[in-house]
Image (spheres, rainbow, N blue to C red):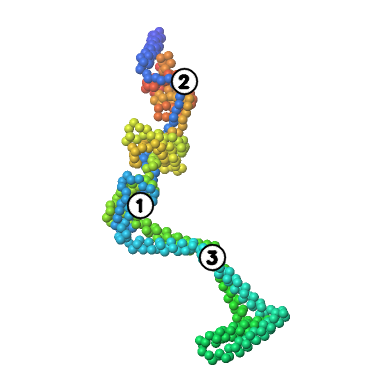
Amino acid sequence: MKKWIILGVIAIVIVGGYFAFRQFRENQQSAAASEYQTVRAARGSLTATVGATGVVRANQSALLVWQTSGSVEQVLVSVGDTVDADEILASLEKTSLPQNVILAQADLVNAQNTLEDLYDTELALAQAEQNLANAQKTVEDAQRYVDNINADAPQADVDQARANVVLAKDELDKARKAFRPYENKAEDNVNRATLQNKLAEAQQRYDAAVSRLNNLLGTVSDTTMEVAQSNLEVAKAQLEEAQKRYDDLKAGPDPVDVTNAQTRIEAAQATLNMVNIQAPFSGRITNVENKPGDQVTPGTPAFRIDDLSHLLVDVQVSEVDINRIQPGQDVKLTFDAILDKEYNGVVKDVALVGNSTQGVVDFTVTVELTDGDEDIRPGMTAAVNIVVRELDDVLLVPNRAVRVREGERVVYILQGGSLTPVSITLGASSDTSSEVVGGDLNPGDMIVLNPPTIFDQNGPPPFVQG
């Protein structure tokens, strides 16, 4: 009997303790409910971002140094000046230059003249064409003469040639007879000179008529034949040379000669360019190292130039997020050095290969500012948020309300003054909110932003849970 009394007392204590704890918890929850921060679950827009930090840099930067030795003659720019590509920034005194730089001017002129001569072929081509025509006619004449020597002449031509010889002989005899009385006269005698001239002409006509007849009769000497054949070969060789000269000029200058001349020009110009410092691209002068009169040697710093027309920020993005980033995505940027101001940008490049540092793989993403101003300078640190996704009309939950309970993400909602855990599945996230893609949360549920810590620890022991 005593045993049953003890068991009854224990049961009463346990039941009483249970109800007392429930009453205590309900009172605690009711008291705390007025202290909870809540917000209704609702649908809305979400901008998902990936955050990173980086340093601003110019689109292009260059440190310019002298390529030769000498004395600085003039410095044409100052820090902050805007310059164009190839603009001369400074130069050296010519009298202070090394000998090879001074002689480069003469080399340049000679090489340019050579190149011009190679391309200036209009007059030479016309002359070559005339020489070719003359050479062709010479070959034709020489060939015709050889053919006439070797060929049997028609009888009519032979008869005419004989008659021409007779007539020429008669004229020659008459000229000799007329000249004979004046043969011993003084050489300045007009009649003697006139008759002697007629005698010479008659002799030439006679010799030509005899030669013509001999050719027709085939009685030319071996010497005459050899001379005629030799003249023909010489004429052919001259024709071949004239043809080659014409073809070469018509085809244009020899590419090898042109390349050699251009190489000489480029080498001489490169040497002359060492006299000046030129801007390699358009930009602003951000540093000036020299003053007129300074002595410089190869490698002496001269200027720094930066292209500030496009400002870039290189950031490192984890491999977990890199596949969500693509060129063209919008970017929001803020700077510690520029308070209460947000800038816009766009993703310009995404690295294809990652960099591993102590086992952590990051990828370089280059962002270009689209509304940069004078306040932003290369070297500043920028906080970058890349917009990877924009969603409309999705169920949202504040990030601060999300808890992990028994390995699941949950939020706590108020129902009848009591806190109830609701499981959720999250999608895209921003800095403040996340998309709910699954679970038991419904629009209109009162989400608790600051649930008690006890609920994050799965509540009281099982034997006292309701």
Report which residue position mark 1 lands on. 88
- For marks 3 and 1, the one nearer the N-term is 1
User: Dot 1 surroundings within 10 Å: few (below 14), some, or many (20 or more)?
Assistant: some
User: Dot 3 surroundings within 10 Å: few (below 14), some, or many (20 or more)?
Assistant: some
Q: Amino acid at mark 1?
A: Ile
Q: Residue placed at 54% from the left, 65% from the top?
A: 126
Report which residue position mark 3 lands on. 126
User: Dot 2 surroundings within 10 Å: few (below 14), some, or many (20 or more)?
Assistant: few
Q: Amino acid at mark 3?
A: Ala
- Residue 109: image location, x then y, percent: 41, 62
Spatial separation of the CA atoms under disc 3 and disc 1: 44 Å
Left or right relative to 274: residue 145 = right
Q: Residue placed at 39% from the left, 58% from the top?
A: 270
SS category of the residue bearing label 1: strand
The one nearer the camera, 195 or 87, is: 195
Mark in the foreground, 1 or 2: 1
Spatial separation of the CA atoms under disc 2 and disc 3: 94 Å
Left or right relative to 214: residue 410 = left
The one nearer the camera, 426 or 147, is: 147
Is residue 228 at all visible to an observer of this figure?
A: yes
Mark in the foreground, 2 or 3: 3
Report which residue position mark 2 lands on. 443
